[in-house]
Image (cartoon, rainbow, N blue to C red):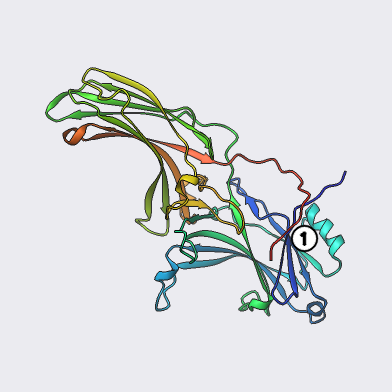
């Protein structure tokens, strides 16, 4: 049986250092993260000079616009999560993957493997979408594998001998559905008898990207008010944990309906409204959270951030959540009645298949 691997390759500007990795997406299963592995190949001159080569895992958290930086103020934190010396080789036990074993045989004696463990509490890759004409760095959390030549891992790297390759830390949907979301809200009126009741139910808790969400709505009007129309929305919640007031929401899908309205006193209404949250309908909106972008790769809305517990919440740079909000409009004097249901929006876990092609990024 012949097994082929998809390999990403990137070369330093001086052609002395080359990085090989067979994947750029690493799955976070909440309790652990897949190890980051690859091969570094050195030119004969670097080997003769016994140059020290380091590989690092960098987490870049930008929390403000690059255009607003002035007088030495930077809205960016760059954290070195892992730092290893690749050459000269250190005496460290390493579990090599099949890809590393094959590449070591193919690339010769100047090839050196590395494995890095990403901390489980590190945030998922997510960025906030910019306007089309904005060329500055986006706000969000991004990861890079950095390979450079230097005297120590704290040495300032030179651009000509440095490789930086973007990677992503991602989460996939759980295998089991949770409890079916359902909520019931009531509203009474100060000068009117009776109350208005709104019950909202989703058909399930977990949805995949691009999947249609069925919102079951039941209205019982036991008041003397009149319901003019019904509006359903899908909202994306973004919590930037670095700031005390860093929470905001984007409405990424919505629909209004007057069918069955006006709903008079003593009447009831049952209906189902469908919404599909996707990036295509929000591609020009700034501030929408999308999955950490990798060059030349299509992206999607950011997935729901799953965390083990509230204690580890502060370690995450940006937390993304989703909710369905249903609103009843009662006119200028009657006001509104709202109900909200959180749900999970994620990608299903793909099956890993061997891919025959080789992709080279320069």
- Count of all numbered marks drawn on residues in the image: 1
Q: Can residue 2 be seen in this view?
A: yes
Q: Where is residue 34 in the image (x, y as percent from the top left)?
A: 66, 51
* Mark 1, residue position: 93
Residue 90, relative to residue 342: is it above or below? below
Question: Which residue does the image show at 73% across and 55% down from the upper left?
Answer: 22
Which of the image's four quarters has the C terminus? bottom right
Q: Residues within 10 Å of mark 1 (few under 14, many from 20)?
A: few
> How far from the left and from the top, in percent, is residue 227?
24, 27
User: Residue 243: x percent and y percent?
Assistant: 38, 59
Q: Can residue 33 be seen in this view?
A: no
Q: In this view, does 113 lie above or below 181?
A: below
Point 45% across, 69% down: residue: 66
Residue in the image at 57% along x and 40% along y: 173
Decide which of 151, 46 is in the foreground and name it: 46
Residue 350 against residue 219 in the figure, above or below: below
Query: Horizontal and vertical percent for residue 331?
Result: 20, 33
Viewer-proximal residue among 34 and 301: 301
């Amino acid at each position: 049986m012949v097994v082929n691997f998809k390999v990403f390759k990137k070369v330093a500007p001086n052609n002395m250092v080359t990085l090989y990795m067979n994947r750029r997406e690493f799955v976070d299963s909440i309790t652990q993260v897949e190890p980051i592995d690859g091969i570094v190949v050195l030119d004969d001159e670097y080997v003769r000079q016994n140059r020290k080569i380091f590989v690092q895992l960098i987490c870049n958290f930008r929390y403000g616009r690059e255009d607003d930086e002035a007088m030495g103020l930077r809205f960016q934190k760059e954290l070195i999560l892992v730092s290893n010396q690749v050459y000269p080789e250190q005496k460290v036990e390493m579990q090599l993957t099949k890809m590393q074993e094959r590449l070591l045989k193919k690339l010769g004696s100047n090839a050196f493997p590395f494995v890095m463990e990403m901390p489980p509490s590190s945030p998922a890759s997510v960025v906030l979408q910019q306007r089309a004409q904005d060329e500055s760095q986006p706000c969000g959390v991004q990861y890079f594998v950095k390979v450079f030549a230097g005297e120590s891992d704290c040495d300032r790297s030179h651009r000509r001998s440095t490789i930086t390759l973007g990677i992503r830390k991602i989460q996939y949907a759980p295998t089991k559905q949770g409890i079916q979301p359902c909520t019931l809200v009531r509203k009474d009126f100060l000068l009117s008898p009776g109350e208005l009741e709104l019950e909202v139910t989703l058909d399930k808790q977990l949805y995949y990207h691009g999947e249609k969400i069925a919102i079951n709505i039941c209205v019982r009007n036991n008041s003397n008010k009149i319901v003019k129309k019904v509006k359903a929305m899908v909202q994306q919640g973004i919590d930037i944990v670095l700031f005390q007031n860093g929470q905001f929401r984007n409405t990424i899908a919505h629909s209004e309906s007057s069918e069955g309205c006006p709903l008079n006193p003593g009447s009831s209404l049952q209906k189902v409204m469908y919404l599909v949250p996707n990036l295509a309908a929000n591609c020009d909106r700034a501030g929408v959270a999308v999955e950490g972008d990798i060059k030349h790769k299509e992206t999607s809305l950011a997935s729901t951030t799953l965390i083990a517990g509230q204690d580890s919440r502060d370690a995450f740079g940006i937390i993304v959540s989703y909710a369905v909000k249903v609103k009843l409009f009662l006119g200028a004097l009657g006001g509104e009645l709202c109900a909200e249901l959180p749900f999970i929006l994620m990608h299903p876990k793909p099956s890993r298949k061997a891919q025959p092609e080789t992709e080279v990024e320069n």
